[in-house]
Amino acid sequence: MDPCVQPAPLTARRNGALKGRVRVPGDKSISIRALILGALAVGETRIGGLLEGEDVLSTATALRALGARLEPRGGGEWRIHGVGVGGFAAPAHPLDLGNSGTGCRLLLGAVAGCPIVAAFDGDASLRKRPMRRVLDPLERIGARTLESADGRLPLRLQGARDPIPIVFEPEVASAQLKSATLLAGLAAPGETTVIERAATRDHTEKMLGYFGANVRVAPEGQGGAGRRITLAGQPELVPAPIVVPADPSSSAFPLVAALLVPGSDIVLDGVMTNPLRTGLFVTLAEMGASIELVGVRNEGGEEVADLRVRSAPLRGVEVPAARAPSMIDEYPVLAVAAAFAEGITVMRGLKELRVKESDRLAATAALLRGNGVEVEIDGDDLVVQGKGPVPGGGLVTTHMDHRIAMSALVMGLASERPVAIDDGSFIATSFPGFVELMGSLGAELG
Ligand code: S3P
């Protein structure tokens, strides 16, 4: 994001029922992976429905600086001409990943397998986020961190001349860590293995298989909750067409808004329902939500469905820590739903929220408290006292975090008084057109 962009304050207020049928933009995780794998394949990759949000665009700019050709054709259609595994060229300038943790960490992995030096940087939010966790496995593969303040950006990475295949068992459940390691392992001879104690979103391994790499996935650990992912190195990645499904994390905002605003009845088209992404839908159903999956189908290797959502009274629930990986980005908006529910909602095991685009645990608690909701952080748990009507009337500080911004606006659509945010400009990182899409459903945002 351009540092000269002025903050864009926004306010949401009650305006009657939400109605209509919309498609939220393409999935951010899949869009970023599609660009990176397209850039590592030999030949032309065609992508449809790409999310043209800031995080994806900053990843595209970085890939161009690494020597790949990426051409937008309009309306989410893109053509990528890749350089082949290990074929990135040294970039002339630092790669600026803006606000994108996923773009940055996955590209660190992709660069780690190439014999080049690249500098990485990002905005003030990304500069605060931990990179040491991803540098550790990449250094074992043979990359070297040349400069980094305290394991954070800005940093310079020297990729491995002779990458070594490793077995890596991350301490935290993180799809970004897994993906960075697998992308670095692409250039290594032999097998790179990632052992996850809890399964995280599997888009990287699925897409690698789709591009012709040999990837094996086996259940791991007690009850098979984890995964062992093994990648055979040095494949030739063959371009395959990609259709990006609608992002379940973006769909969460109109979905929760429709649940909370009385009389609402909306349809969200073509939302990805990959079970490693749908913890929010499961939780909301437990809370009494009415979400109907219509026309379940497979598109481009992912299960998608149209979601029909009608407003419903919600009740508080306990959300187990084991569910966190499948809804890690959805806690702020779940907390908003919990504020309107009857009874207490306890969300357990949210330590990772502290290192997202903002300290999301603190920012979510502040969002609720500032709008008259009783909330408490208890260790790594968030406890929300749902009491039905929410007073609202707050001005929410968004801390450069798109999901805090959208969650606060969703609250304002159903609370007694309007809710304002200090800055809506970061919404464009993941959900360009959010205000217009919500407006088309009847929401009053401005
Ligand atoms: C993502 C993984 C998650 C998620 C992020 C996208 C991905 O991060 O929060 O928005 O695309 O791999 P972690 O891997 O840090 O949990």
Image (tube, rainbow, N blue to C red):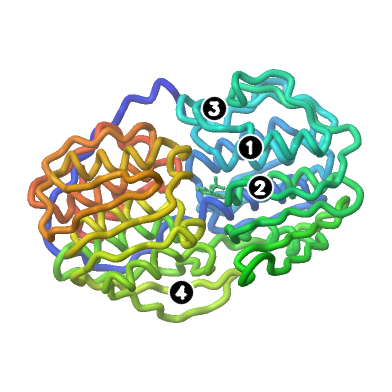
Q: Contact, CB < 8 Å: mark 4 with mark 1? A: no
Q: Mark 4 points at which residue?
A: 305
Single out the mark in the foreground, 4 or 1: 1
Where is mark 2, residue-wise? 170
Say which residue label 3 marks.
122
Q: Do the residues labelled 1 and 2 touch (CB within 8 Å)?
A: yes
- Vertical comparison of 113 with 343: above or below: above
For ligand 1, tell me if the residue under mark 1 lies within 8 Å: no
Secondary element at tag 4: strand
Q: Nearer the viewer, mark 3 or mark 4?
A: 3
Please indicate whether residue 302 sits to the left or right of residue 305 in the image.
Answer: right
Q: Which of marks 4 and 2 is nearer the N terminus?
A: 2
Q: Name the residue under label 1.
A: 133
Q: Does the residue labelled 4 lie within 8 Å of ligand 1?
A: no
- Amino acid type of the residue tagged 3 in the rendering: Gly
Left or right: residue 244 versus residue 343 is right
Q: Distance between the residues labelled 4 and 1?
A: 35 Å
| Circle 1 Cα neighbour tier, 10 Å, few/some/many (<14 / 14–19 / ≥20) | some
Q: Distance between the residues labelled 3 and 1?
A: 17 Å
- Choose the circle earlier in sequence order: 3 or 1: 3
